[in-house]
Amino acid sequence: MELALEARHLRVEVGAPSTRRDVVRDVSVLLKRGEITALVGETGSGKTMTALSLMRLLPPTARGTAGTLRVGELDLTRLSEREMTRVRGSRISMIFQDPLAALNPVRTVGFQIAEPLVAHLGLSRREANIRAGALLEQVGIPDPAYNLRRYPHELSGGMRQRVLIAAALACDPEVLIADEPTTALDVTVQAQVLGLIKTEVERRGLAVMLVTHDLAVASSIADRIQVLYAGATAEYGTSRTVIREPNHPYTRGLLQSVPSSKVTTVPMHSIPGSPEGAWQLDIGCRFSPRCSFAIAQCRKDEPPLESVAPGHESRCWVFATPKVVTQA
Amino acid sequence: MSTVLDVRGLGVDYRVRTGIRSTRVNRAVDDVTFTVETGKTLALVGESGSGKTSVARAVLGLAPTSRGTITINGRTLHSRGRSRLKEVGREVQMVFQQPGGSLDPRMSIGETVAEPLTYLSKLSRAATEARVVELLDLVGLEGSFRSRKPRDLSGGQRQRVAIARAIATSPSLVICDEPTSSLDVSVQAQIINLLVRLQRELGLTYLFISHSLGVVRQIAGNVAVMYRGRIVELGQTERVLDRPQDPYTQALLRAVPTVGAVEVAG
């Protein structure tokens, strides 16, 4: 299987030495060509820090380390900051939740899509502009001649996200990291933007990591789902498996907590407590205080991420680890 | 059954400056009519710019009402701005989307919940204290939370405090403006269950604003779907969501991603 991005044992610490804490403790990310992997998590799960560490774009207060971090054959951990700048935008790109903040307000749409083409591919402004027009049409923005000259504030939220996608894909990168790209958008627009991402994955063989808090979004578009809790992977598998046969109690609880527009279930299933502050726990399974299945061992030792079936992993003493016993 | 809120032909216009001397009128709400019955929930759903929040703000007098009438408990409101807030303050309370922003960071939880009691009711100090403990208990927080500050609380706990404050004076209408949108999914269900339980126990009436059809399904008996300032469909929630008649409602329902569905619309 061809890996477009391989990141193993990512770790991110934030804060001053005296107050330092791990926000990402043990997360590995494997992205395959032509696939979308959804990184699903709630507050404090470390999903955004994971995404930023893949780009080597962590804020100055954070320190990240990785066992392995490569795009294709290129080892990103060995690159200088200067070399990394050449990789971002050309081989690995990122789009963000708030497209207005990610776009430069005083530059036209055309300039911003052409910028990576000039910087990375060395195209002339004129050539880059022609290419930018074609990219705009690809992302579903009509009349490129007119829209290239517009400024971000003149566009709707959905159009801004399309522009950002066009700029991110301009140099035909292998990997796209999308951090909550549709969270700020209305559902009808969200469906269009997700559809666009899916189209680009199929057309280019792009590998996408979609960071989201929304399991419904994840299950509707992703090939694989990776559930994070308190800085570590809780469960990983194909979307079908994670949605239909979730192993980890957290994934199960999360699935049951999603309000459905099709069925009324009051009182709704909820997970007691809150994900905020789970990192404060330093021994045992980070989810154990909220877990109704927790046994004594859960409060003592952190479970390892175990394979429960081919391509399906879970971090749980109760459901994932004793598989040897149950199979016998 | 009595009607708590009766909105008829409501129009809200905002004046938008388009140049140094020119302005344009932006009709945010156009000819909106609905009622909310005692002890029931009406949800206003729609996408951004549909006018759902403007309707809520108009009820509180925070948005300019250009046409129509708003009647609360049989009394038609005429005042505007601050005097409207004073007029409706006891009867209508609001729970906002961002509990972080709607709670004063310098006030303790006890002071926050006591504030409407101090201004709007004539309780003694001891009675206020007792009522605060009672309210915190109602929303599932221990009395020890009284001395804590909002920063010590999780998002879900803050929203519980905001709900306790909103129901402190036993208002006849509670407007909930996207009360669970900023919360984690695993916590959202707790808050929805809390709102449903409080309604059952205290007979509360909600005007519930949301963009999430899933949340609306769980909490509201009736739903009004808004699009570009107008109500395009109004009726029993189950009927509207299961058999939508209006093309916009149908499009909205199609666009909602559901867990387990493998295809994306659009």
Image (spheres, rainbow, N blue to C red):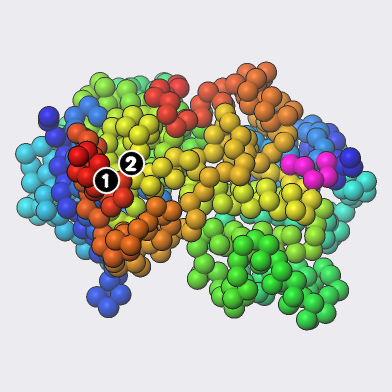
Residue wearing tag 2: A247
Overall secondary structure of the magenta stretch? loop
Residue at 62%, 49% (x, y): give it. Answer: B193
Residue closer to the observer: A183 or B153: B153
The amino acid at mark 2 is Asn
Q: Taking A167 as reference, is B221 left or right?
A: right
Residue B101 can be seen in this image: no
Residue wearing tag 1: A320
Residue at 67%, 18% (x, y): give it. Answer: B245
The amino acid at mark 1 is Ala
Mark nearer the N terminus (2 vs 1): 2
The answer for which chain carries disc 1 is A
Q: Which residues are magenta?
A: B37-41
Residue at 36%, 26% (x, y): give it. Answer: A196
Q: Is residue B142 magenta?
A: no
From the top left corner, tell me how far across and down residue B163 is, in percent.
66, 59
